Amino acid sequence: MSIVFLDGDFIHKDEAKISPDDRGFLLADGVYEVTPFYSGVPFGLDRHMARLERGLAWMRIHYSLDGLEDIHNRLIRANDLQDAPTSYVYLQITRGAAPRTHYFPQEDVEPTVYAFARTWQRPSPERWARGFSAVTVPDRRWSRVDIKTICLLPNVLAFQDAIEAGADDAVLVRDGVAIEGAHMNFWGVFNGTVVTHPVTNNILPGITREIVLELAGQAGIALEERPIQVEELREADELFFTGTTGEVRPLTCLNGTVVGDGSVGPLTKTLSDLFHGKVQEIQKAAEESIA
Ligand SMILES: Cc1ncc(COP(=O)(O)O)c(C=O)c1O
């Protein structure tokens, strides 16, 4: 039985009730975060909470983040996920329930805060080593996708288009630029340089992206943050995505054409190894602090 957090209480999911007037339900007026846990240890929680805080501030939703770390840890324990190799906590904060208007409610409304925990599965090493496929899909999102709002319809439609095209994922294209994935950031390797789109209002500033950039920099890997033109994709030696539940995900086939020599490239592999090393480091530090 899943235990969820709703507006101050830890309850069985079956008991969770949200008003039909909730502005998240009616207007997608809310933000969310997904924070990964490895064997019950949070990974990058501070960074996820900082992104959430920026989103809340921009949306002008007033909610204190003080108790959120505790809520995350309690949800993991309440759902017996301390030993799950990979899990996450999903947290959503909406502006709350109020008569539907296109402007903010005029009376004081309490935000609705909902969170749940669940496991996610890494692909097997054999599956990962084969690489994944994607197709390019037009980016139909709005101009503030740097804010992690729950307004994900264009992402859902893009992912669905990819599935219907027989691919594993989508690469969103805007003005001739391969911007990012439907739920992950997008990277390419060109002549030994690892390239990803800079942080602008047109991409979600991924926490995994940020960590992988730091690890690549520390390892002395050549890096460039610049837009990747769609025409360049044919010349890419390697392509990959990064994201919370995707980690570093190799892309070996794009629009039905193999990427590079069709196998997972060396820099993708190195970055994935560095990322897993960082996860282990955080887990070890948590174990030592308990011992
Ligand atoms: C559009 C988009 N880009 C990138 C990401 C990756 O972000 P993160 O690494 O923080 O999971 C996500 C995650 O949900 C996303 O939805």
Image (tube, rainbow, N blue to C red):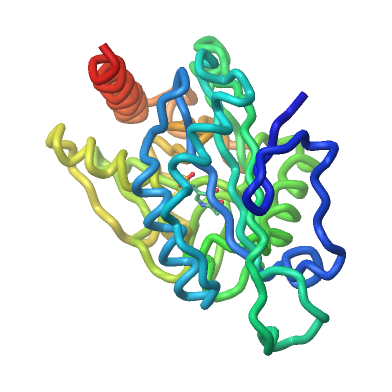
Q: Is residue 229 left or right of residue 276?
A: right
Q: Position of residue 91 (x, y in %)?
A: 59, 48
Quadrant hosting residue 209: top left
Quadrant hosting residue 76: top right
Observer able to see residue 270:
no
Q: Residue at x 63, y 24 (%)?
A: 79
Q: Residue at x 28, y 56 (%)?
A: 225
Q: Residue at x 51, y 65 (%)?
A: 63
Q: Position of residue 128 (x, y in %)?
A: 52, 19
Relative height, residue 81 to residue 2 (above, below): above
Quarter of the figure that contains the C terminus? top left
Observer able to see residue 153:
yes
Quadrant hosting residue 172: bottom right
Viewer-closest of 147 and 264: 147
Viewer-closest of 204 and 54: 54
Q: Position of residue 157 (x, y in %)?
A: 75, 55
Q: Is residue 97 left or right of residue 119?
A: right
Query: Outermost residue, front direction?
Result: 9
Q: Position of residue 153 (x, y in %)?
A: 73, 60
Viewer-closest of 203 and 22: 22
Q: Is residue 195 left or right of residue 2?
A: left
Count of labels in the image: 0
